[in-house]
Image (tube, helix red, strand yellow):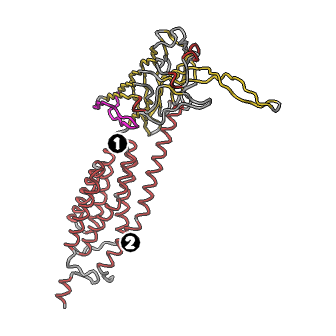
Amino acid sequence: MAKERSPGFKLGMTVLIGALLAIPLFMVYALVWDRQSQSETARASVAEGWGGPQMLAGPVMVIPYRQQSVETVTENGKATTRAVTIERELFLAPVTNTAAVDVEPERRTKSIYETVVYEARVKGTARFALPEDLARFGVRPEELLLDRAEIRVGISDARGLLADNSLAMAGRALPLRPGKGLGSTNGSGFFAFADWSDSAGAPVDVAYRFGVRGNGQLMLIPDGEATDWTVRSHWPHPSFAGQFLPNTRQVSDKGFTARYKISNLALGRAIVQLPQPGEQVAAGGQLAQIDLIEPVNLYSQVDRAVKYGFLFIGFTFLAFLMFDIIAGARVAAAEYLLTGAGLILFFVLLLAFAEIIGFTLAYLLASGAIIGLISAYSAAVLGSTKRAGFIGGLLLGLYALLYVLLNLEAYSLLIGSVLLFVALAAVMYVTRRVDWSGLGKRDEVAATA
């Protein structure tokens, strides 16, 4: 007969095998990262033909102006003073800008990967007026070239522009031209020539309408004395971010409505900007951002589940060890390895099925398969269907607990730490009479003495 090993030796062997199983567990973790990278690549390829995350800015009125400047130059060794005419641009933000943004989401797939894209239709009215204190900015009204004014709209990814776009000034349609966007969108967008000389710079309304395609995010850059945006969509899972959050919002299963009211006092800049030649006027990174998120990111869920892999291995091995030491069922090292391999296989099955049928159904299918497999194997290893039923019940409880932890992220640390405390207390109680350096229980050793 083979020599019986001490409980301490069995504990050490179990810990060693558990540590070795960290290698395939880390390989599963790398697999999750790889599949997530492939998913992001697939989404990026969809965006290439559709449009990326969109950033919208404007409209802004750009008015050239001329000023006389005196400069001193040296000619033939003599200093000469002369007057030079310099032409620059004045950027005028609207006094009021009211717009409605309707976002229509759509799911697009490539292979087994899915991404959310959208079409955003923007319709609004902006009122422009020269400030009464324009001279305080160093520009006199008579220096403005109002007949050469332009209205510019910034769009970060102009590839996503749809058809049927328009600009109208005082009810007069303006032909649209590509390019000349704003600095906040790196010059991408469109513009129109707008002769403002007819009204000598009197307040004027500009009506605009355009549509863009994008994916993932929609960012709106406020610029004006008073900005009033209303964003609507059928997407039920928005995430609001950026430097400005909605003043009011309504989110339901049928979609969301968000309204933004932003003043230039909050922006911290005047409606008149005078950039130097070649300088772009940017919005300072202040924006309102809306993300069309997925309610459950399966890769982050699987990633978090893998991090609990040692919990499954530890508790299952602990149950096997207790049956070995307390109940006398011999469990070999190979049987620990096979059981651990089955526990790790759960995460591979979960990832594979989740990409096809969704996380919840994949979790039920994968956990059911592994519970059945290990329970049946335990019946042979432990020599008892009752003991195998205990192992199956333990795994069922662990998988149910893991699902709760994955859905209650804020309380996962609390629940996990309490569970570990209870498990440690139970092990300490059950093994309180075990002689870890001997071959049996302390009371049995005392009886033979």
Task: In the rendered view, tell whether residue 14 sits above or below residue 294.
Answer: below
Q: Quadrant of residue 263?
A: top left
Q: Which residues are magenta?
A: 233-253
Question: Relative to the observer, which residue lies in front, 46 or 417?
Answer: 417
Task: In the rendered view, tell whether residue 56 sits above or below residue 149.
Answer: below
Residue at disc 1, secondary structure: loop
- Queried whether the magenta region covers residue 240, the answer comes back as yes
Residue 195 horizontal/vertical position (percent): 55, 12
The residue type indicated by label 2 comes to Leu
- Queried whether the magenta region covers residue 103, the answer comes back as no
Give neighbour class at mark 1: few <14, some 14-19, many 20+ (Cα, 10 Å): few
Residue that numbered label 2 is attached to: 16
Residue 430 horizontal/vertical position (percent): 20, 72
Question: Relative to the observer, which residue lies in front, 433 or 76?
Answer: 76
Which residue is drawn at the image coordinates 45% and 53% (left, top)? 31
Residue that numbered label 1 is attached to: 296
Look at discs 1 and 2 and give the one toward the viewer.
Answer: 1
The residue type indicated by label 1 comes to Val
Question: Relative to the observer, which residue lies in front, 444 or 198?
Answer: 198
Q: Quadrant of the C terminus?
A: bottom left
Judge from the rendering whether residue 445 lies leftward or rightward of residue 213; answer left or right.
left
Q: CA distance from mark 1 to mark 2?
A: 36 Å
Which residue is drawn at the image coordinates 47% and 42% (left, top)? 40
Residue 308 horizontal/vertical position (percent): 34, 58
What's the mark number on residue 413?
none
